[in-house]
Image (cartoon, rainbow, N blue to C red):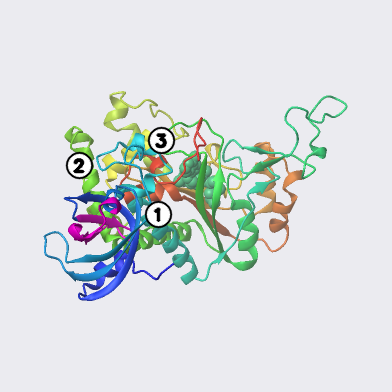
Amino acid sequence: MAKRDKIKAILAKEETNYSTTVMGWVRTFRSNRFISLNDGSTINNLQLVIDYENMDEALLKRVNTGAAIKAEGEIIESQGKGQSVEMVVKTLTVLGDADPEKYPLQPKKHSLEFLRENAHLRFRTNTFSAIFRIRHQIAFAIHQFFHDRGFVYVHTPIITGSDAEGAGEMFQVTAMPMDNLPKTEDGNINYKEDFFGKATNLTVSGQLEAELGALALSEVYTFGPTFRAENSNTSRHLAEFWMIEPEVAFNDLHDNMDLAEDMLKYVIKHCTEHCGDDLAFLEQRLINEEKSKPQNERSPMALLEKLNFCIENDFERVSYTDAINILRNSKPNKKKKFQFLIEDWGADLQSEHERYLVEKHFKKPVILFDYPKDIKSFYMRLNDDEKTVGAMDVLFPGIGEIIGGSQREERLDVLEKRMEDMDIPKEEMDWFLDTRRFGTCPHSGYGLGFERLVLFITGMSNIRDVIPFPRYPGSAEF
Ligand code: 4AD
Ligand code: MG
């Protein structure tokens, strides 16, 4: 194919009076004269000016919304309003037609629900191209953040043979014929005959393997897909989502909080610096969407203001015990407005409580730490009070929990006792316990839910709109 210039570069350099070639998809074609062309490099379109009297009429009939075209011509200073440069087209080629009778994305407003059903085409809308460009920038910034600090990116397995994490329900992986499962003598499924010679699942978290890496490489992180077969049909849950899990030797819980806060601020700042056009578009989208909502349900800040607020202010660090006291005495608790009322210390926090703390009480991101041991995982470090563990959750406005992590239990005897108490099969976890047998050390880590961060930064409200092809109960389309 002939060389082409990206529209982003043409618009950025604002030079005029040179010839070039562009390729992209037609957004609109009006008055038989002006084509709005988008090639995905930016949310902005290039205006192509057609001298229709000297063009083949049959060719112009094929310039429909959604069609792929190639145009060669001269970039000139724009004669009209709304853009600084435009292209006067000399030759035009239709690379791929889009029949206007059949193409679903005609130029009008489409609901997010409609676009979700047409997820194979929604990349072509302003909203979704902006979201997925930002999603890319977030992923890139995360790698940059850890790389600059000397972390090693470790690839942890997607198929796992242990069910130890207990983070959620697992999807089974098998190569056995479902209609004719091999059985043992006592009638159970004989996994020895399966592909791996044992039962296997899709991973719910790469943490345990990341710990193995950290206890040699010092600072590692994972960035990969994770899977949970929970029946959570919410705007915050996916069955397949991406998680970033740093794990750091010699870090305690407070170092862990510092790392999480620094990382979030770095990534958000990167987006405000590199995604200006897309964020401005999404900010306006949100304002329009919220116009139909009552005042008290609208976001208190516009999107960019909210992102800057996050970058500029310290996150509030609050112990679970202090948070419970705040919640117990809160208005919605006293007026019985919470669905789950907070009575005693030890209660698990629901998303309504997390959001109250963040959105109503502190009005900023909050890091809750030192949770009761009974509501947290076996690997979290037991505190001296023997009632709490060194856990931390980062809570964000509009999102709730965005990060979950902890200092890890590095003491073999304490860990083994916790595993026994919580019925974690020690025999299957010998490899994990080896790190505590040989050269154990204090270490900490956390898991960031990638799509929850994308939700926050884009200002979208449904997690199914920030991953290209969402998987959730009852749906694995495309
Ligand atoms: O809190 P979680 O379950 O923590 C772990 O899996 C730890 N092993 C992490 C670690 O310490 N290395 O999950 C971590 C984050 C949550 O805070 C949330 O942001 C996200 O993953 N998450 C989900 N995101 C989308 N859909 C789901 N079903 C999610 N479940 C968790
Ligand atoms: Mg969690």
Identity of the amino acid at label 3? Glu
Q: Which comes sooner in the sequence, label 3 or label 1?
A: 3
Name the residue beneath numbered marker 2.
288
Identify which residue is drawn at 42% across, 33% down: 234
Q: Which mark is residue 3?
A: none
Identify which residue is drawn at 22% across, 54% down: 305
Q: CA distance from mark 3 to mark 1?
A: 20 Å
User: Can residue 309 be seen at all in this image of the molecule?
Assistant: no
Q: Quadrant of residue 137?
A: bottom left
Q: Local crowd at mark 1 within 10 Å, few (<14), some, or many (≥20)?
A: many
Q: Which comes sooner in the sequence, label 1 or label 2?
A: 1
Q: Local crowd at mark 3 within 10 Å, few (<14), some, or many (≥20)?
A: few
Queried on whether the Cβ of the residue with tag 3 lies below 8 angstroms from ligand 1, the answer reads no
Left or right: residue 81 versus residue 305 is left
Name the residue beneath numbered marker 1.
135
Q: Read off the magenta span.
A: 34-59
Q: CA distance from mark 1 to mark 2?
A: 22 Å
Q: Nearer the viewer, residue 457 or 478?
A: 478
Name the residue beneath numbered marker 3.
117
Residue 249 x %, y %: 58, 63
Residue 376 x %, y %: 54, 41
User: Can residue 231 be seen at all in this image of the molecule?
Assistant: yes
Identity of the amino acid at label 1? Arg
Left or right: residue 463 versus residue 195 is left
Numbered disc 3: secondary structure: helix
Mark whose residue sits in front, 3 or 2: 3
Numbered disc 2: secondary structure: helix
Q: Quadrant of the N terminus?
A: bottom left
Q: Is residue 194 magenta?
A: no
